[in-house]
Amino acid sequence: MNYKLRHFIKKFDFIKTYNSPFKPPIPKLYIGETKIGTPYFLPRVWVKSKEKQGYLVPKPKKIGFDFVGLGWKTKWTDTDYRFEWSPVWSFVFFGYQIAITFVPVEVYHYWECWLYYIYHTDKTKSTKERLEQARKGFPCEWTSYSNNTEITTCYWDKILKDKWL
């Protein structure tokens, strides 16, 4: 499989969440003027500059599709995941846009736990064993304070389907 095809298919990896122990992301529909970024900028194309030879300049996309995969990076280690943006499918047509953004519950924690689960658990083990491994290796527990009371939240309990709790 060539690089461009692999790169295109990778944009749809998040669809695996629908057949996983994670609650499925909820598609959020937007219809209106072009306002949803793909991911950092509004949909655009690069065209040759008329003023500077050899340069490309961005122009708003008139008509077209964009398929944006899950945006993430690692920070300090190979398991220190940082969520950046949810997957988006976008269609623009002369200043108007139809966009579907796939947004799960607890969006930041969800995608970071998902990435750990798919990249750092043993795929030869059962789903239950993989979840145990993920919860141990990537606890995703956060402590907050309210009125001098400590509150600890385990986000795994919020993002997994009831069957897997």
Image (spheres, rainbow, N blue to C red):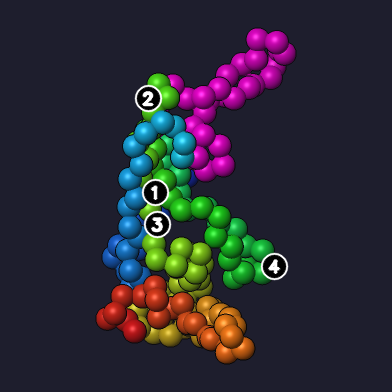
* Magenta stretch contains residue 18: no
Q: Nearer the viewer, residue 34 or 161?
A: 34
Magenta extent: 37-65
Mark found first going from the N terminus, 2 or 3: 2
The amino acid at mark 3 is Val
What mark, if any, has residue 44 been given in the picture?
none
**Labels 2 and 4: the sequence-earlier one:** 4
Residue placed under numbered mark 3 in the picture: 103
Residue 150: quadrant of the picture = bottom right
10 Å neighbourhood of mark 4: few (<14), some, or many (≥20)? few
Distance from disc 1 to disc 3, alpha carbons, whole Å, reads 6 Å
Real-space Cα distance between discs 2 and 3?
24 Å
In which image quadrant can residue 20 be found?
bottom left
For the residues labelled 2 and 1, the Cα–Cα distance comes to 18 Å
Which-is-in-front pick, marks 1 and 4? 1
In this view, 87 is above or below 147:
above
Which residue matches tag 2?
Answer: 93
Does the residue at mark 2 contact the one at mark 4 (Cβ under 8 Å)?
Answer: no
Which is closer to the viewer, label 4 or label 3? 3
Q: Secondary structure at mark 1?
A: strand
Does residue 147 appear to the left or right of 7 in the view shown? right
Helix, strand or loop for disc 4 = loop
Q: Position of residue 159 (x, y in %)?
A: 39, 73
Q: Is residue 63 magenta?
A: yes
Q: Mark 3 falls on what kind of element?
A: strand
